[in-house]
Amino acid sequence: MQVDTAATENTLELSRINWLTPLEAHTQALSGPREPGTAGVKGWQWQRVDPALTPFRDSNVASQQEVTPAPAAAAAAIPVQVPPRTLETSCTSRPAATPTLGQKDRVLSELQGCWKNCLDGKEYYLVRGAEVLRLKVGVDSKPFRLHWDHASSRLWWGSTGRYSLQPPLESPLQLAVWESSDGSGRGFTWERAQETEAQQCEHKLKSQQQQQQQQQHFQQQQQQQQFQQQQRQQELQQRALQQQALQRQQAWVQQYQQQYRHPAQGSMNLQSPMGCGCHALASAWPHQQMWYNPVMAVRYAPY
């Protein structure tokens, strides 16, 4: 847009401004200036007004209220202009409301302590921080984790988000309702346990921990004993195998000593270990010597 300079010439005090499009400015340059007070083709014209007589409203309030159209005559004389800052505030979107940082701590503080399952009186839940320990008579204790979901501003049972806690409506909280997230309506409800029940729960927890420690110690002792027994059995087996090998060797030597004898000497000399080599046998005659192979049972005599 361009200001109509021809309409502002020869004026002591500027009270009206005409805005022209580039096409209108080009047409005016060819045809000459317009008459004073004549608006452009688009009819966009500013007129000076007294600031004291003009009501100004807050941009946030003006953006929320409905704008009532002005009469045709008034609009032609004084067109209504929207302040630029109002347009900026209307274009920018406000951030979504985020849960306060203390909301998670407040819900967790209300949930601390000992709770009892309303459907099963023998099942207790001990909440410490974001950790939950389930206690049940005759069943090993099992830990769970609580997870805070910022999108729903709720406390969830476990990281999978299967159950969510209803926002506490009372303080101190006496009844905790867990809702199912799959829409099936299946959930569970906790009831705050009494002080005596909480003490019993603590005692059960300590006794279970002691029993678990004793069982672990007993299992470790059993494993050590089994390992020692296995080592002893292996040693005994090795000794038995060594004795059997020694007995077989001695029986083999005795068998050859009894079966193969030299007719002149009586028995052969087997001081060296048995093998495939030949043993020199002393003959009854000094000028002769006989050789004997104990494996092949063959005698060799000189010519």
Image (cartoon, rainbow, N blue to C red):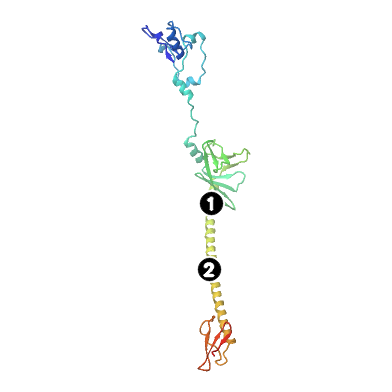
> Which image quadrant: the N terminus?
top left
Q: Is residue 176 visible?
A: no
Return the residue nearer the eye: 170 or 19. Answer: 19
Which residue lies under the disc numbered 1? 205
Residue lying farthest front? Answer: 303
Q: Which mark is on residue 40?
A: none
Q: Position of residue 14 (x, y in %)?
A: 38, 9
The residue under label 1 is which amino acid type?
Answer: Leu
Q: Report which quarter residue 211 is drawn in.
A: bottom right
Residue lying farthest top? Answer: 35
What residue do we see at 59% from left, 48% from top? 123
What residue do we see at 47% from left, 37% from top? 102
The residue under label 2 is which amino acid type?
Answer: Gln
**102 above or below 125?**
above
**59 above or below 175?**
above
What residue do we see at 46% from left, 23% from top? 88
Label 2 Cα neighbours within 10 Å, binned few <14 / some 14-19 / many ≥20: few
> Which image quadrant: the C terminus?
bottom right
Return the residue nearer the eye: 26 or 248. Answer: 26
Q: Earlier in the sequence, mark 1 or mark 2?
A: 1
CA separation, marks 1 and 2?
Answer: 39 Å
Q: Is residue 220 visible?
A: yes
Which residue lies under the disc numbered 2? 231
Q: Position of residue 19 (x, y in %)?
A: 44, 13
Label 1 Cα neighbours within 10 Å, binned few <14 / some 14-19 / many ≥20: some
Asked if residue 19 lies left or right of residue 165, the reply is left
Tag 1 secondary structure = helix
**226 above or below 241?**
above
Asked if residue 95 lies left or right of residue 137, the reply is left
Q: Position of residue 231 (x, y in %)?
A: 53, 68
Q: Position of residue 60 (x, y in %)?
A: 47, 22
